[in-house]
Each structure stands twice: as structure tokens, then as C-alpha cells.
Image (cartoon, rainbow, N blue to C red):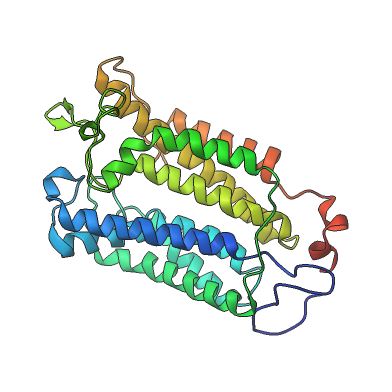
Amino acid sequence: MENAGDGPRSGKSSQGPAGPGLAEVLVVWALCGLIGLSILLTYSREPHETLYHVSGGGLSGGLSRLLVFVNWPGALIAIAVLGVVLDRVRKPLLGLIALLLCAAIVIPGVVEQSDLDAKWINIVPAIGVGLVLVLTALAARDGIGGWGDSRGDWLRVAVFVVLALVSVPWFLAEQGVYAGDIPGLRSIFYSKQVYHGEVAVHLGEHHGLVGLQLMTIALLLSRELPRMRESIRRTALAVWLSGLIAYGAGNIANDAWGEQVVKRGWTTWTLPSVVRPDLNWLWLVVLAVTAVIFFTALKPRRDQAATDPVSSST
């Protein structure tokens, strides 16, 4: 049985780890910080005409786009982190409030791809992300607890490397650089070529790169699933991580296909958007892939409670 109390649990016990480690969580926050800094610098420096669906420039424009990033994909990432840290710190009410605030991202109009300027409503999910940061700090008071299960890392690395190569134009665009300005890349990737009066790959953040961010972070946090106590929260987190991987892959496919295939004139057939939930065939694929990932890779095993000291002690 779990001990009563309101403080964070220790990362260790006489029987083994008393909960997931926070090493991957801290890496996730560090990655989000680096991406956020990159967005702030690029959107503060570049003219808004070279960016995507923003109207402001300078520092205010950079801060505006940074707030939108904290909403999307930040709130989606924070929900995943919340699932891990709540296994180490007993703050259910604060966790529920953070979850509801982050979930506001699904309300139509909070973040729209057609208008990426910050609005007052964007403060709501940002507060939720901030609360998850607070919970992370509380969970870390008793130590980091080490790294998660390394099984499957070869597959995680392989997936990341392949998709990172596809994402090269987006990596550069987020730094305010066109792939076409770099010798050796201009013959591989479309970027500065004009398509319907605009460059093929705009500068700044791309939803394809957001897809890679979500996949990378979900793959990182999945290493902690075997160390978590058997619970509904753990199963829900496994479903959420599976969904982030599939959702991220859908956004990568949509963005890469449109920019590197359709805009070259190879075909006029396009992939539907999956940025927001919609009734289209690619969303059906995302849901199907989510189920496949969950049932084949991330679903908690029934026999784990008997072999895992964390689960058997609860």
C-alpha cells in the first residue's frame, strides 16, 4: 500500500525504485527550452513576411510566437510529462488543474494555424505548462532517480535519425536559414524555390518539425513506463505517448509531402492536415497507428506486476 502524505516520494526504496526517474523529463524540458529560445531569436530577428501567419516583428513578435509554442506543442508535451511526475509526487488536485489548463489547447480558436499571433487565451494553457514545471521541481526534491528502461533504444535512435534527415530544411528554417543557401543541400531539398508566389519552405517553426519534437519526446518518456506503478494513469500515459508518436508522424508526412513532393510538381495529390482533429483519412491512419503502437510496444504488461519491484510493492 502507498503511504499517506502530501510530499514527493523517494526515488528509491529497499525493494528498488519507488517510481519513474526524472532524467528523461529533465531532457524534455531542456529540449523545449532550446527550441523556445530558437523560436524567440528567429521570430525577433526575421521580418514577419518571411515567417508563417504572424503579423508582428521584433522582440514582441518573438515573445508572441514563443507563447504560441508554449501552447502548441508545449501543452501536449506537458500532459505527457505530467503523467510521469505525478507518479513521484502526490499532488492530485494540482495535477488535475494543470491537466485541465493544458487541455484548453483543444478548444477551437486557442491556436489556429491560420493565425499564429498570441492571444489572451493563450495564457491559459501556458499556466498549465507552468504548473507541470512546478510539479517537476517538487518531484525532483528527492533526487532524479536515474534513467529509464533502455530496451528498444536502438529502434528509438533509428526512428529519430531517419526523421531528422527528413527534417533538415525545418531545422534550418527554425534558425532563420534556407536549406537552399547551403551548398550540398540546395540540390536535395526544396526551400527557396518559389511556389504560387511564395518560397517553398518558409522560415521559422514548421508543423513537420513540431511532429519530430513530439515523436522524440514521446520516445524519450516511454523509457520510464516500465518503472511506473501499475495504474490507470500509467495506461493513460502509454496511450497518450502512442498518440503523440502517431500524431507527430502524421504532421511530418503532411509537411514533407507538401513541400518536397507536391511543390516540385511531381504530383498534385496532397495529404490532408492532421494539425487539428478532423474527419479525414489521414486522421484515421493516425488513430490506427496509435492503437498499433500501444498494443505492440507501450501497453503495460500484465506480468510486470509480478516481476517489477515497483508494481509488486503497491
Residue at image position (69%, 77%) is 9
Q: How many marks?
A: 0
Residue at image position (67%, 42%) is 152
Q: Position of residue 21 (x, y in %)?
A: 65, 65
Residue at image position (11%, 29%) is 197
Vertical arrangement, residue 7 with respect to residue 188, above or below: below
Query: In the image shown, does 178 or 297 lie closer to the viewer?
Result: 178
Vertical arrangement, residue 268 with respect to residue 178, above or below: above
Q: Position of residue 188 (x, y in %)?
A: 31, 24
Asked which quadrant contains residue 31, the reply is bottom left
Vertical arrangement, residue 176 with respect to residue 61, above or below: above
Q: Position of residue 182 (x, y in %)?
A: 24, 34
Vertical arrangement, residue 241 with respect to residue 20, above or below: above
Asked which quadrant contains residue 84, the reply is bottom right
Q: Is residue 125 left or right of residue 293?
A: left
Q: Is residue 156 left or right of residue 149?
A: left
**Residue occupying the far right of the picture:** 306
Residue at image position (40%, 53%) is 73
Q: Is residue 121 visible?
A: yes
Asked which quadrant contains residue 156, the reply is top right
Query: In the image shown, does 50 or 7 lie closer to the viewer?
Result: 50
**Residue occupying the far front of the picture:** 183
Q: Is residue 27 left or right of residue 143?
A: left
Query: In the image shown, does 60 or 161 lie closer to the viewer?
Result: 161
Q: Is residue 71 visible?
A: no
- The quadrant of the rendering that contains the N terminus is bottom right
- The quadrant of the rendering that contains the C terminus is bottom right
Q: Position of residue 304 (x, y in %)?
A: 82, 53
**Residue occupying the far top of the picture:** 266
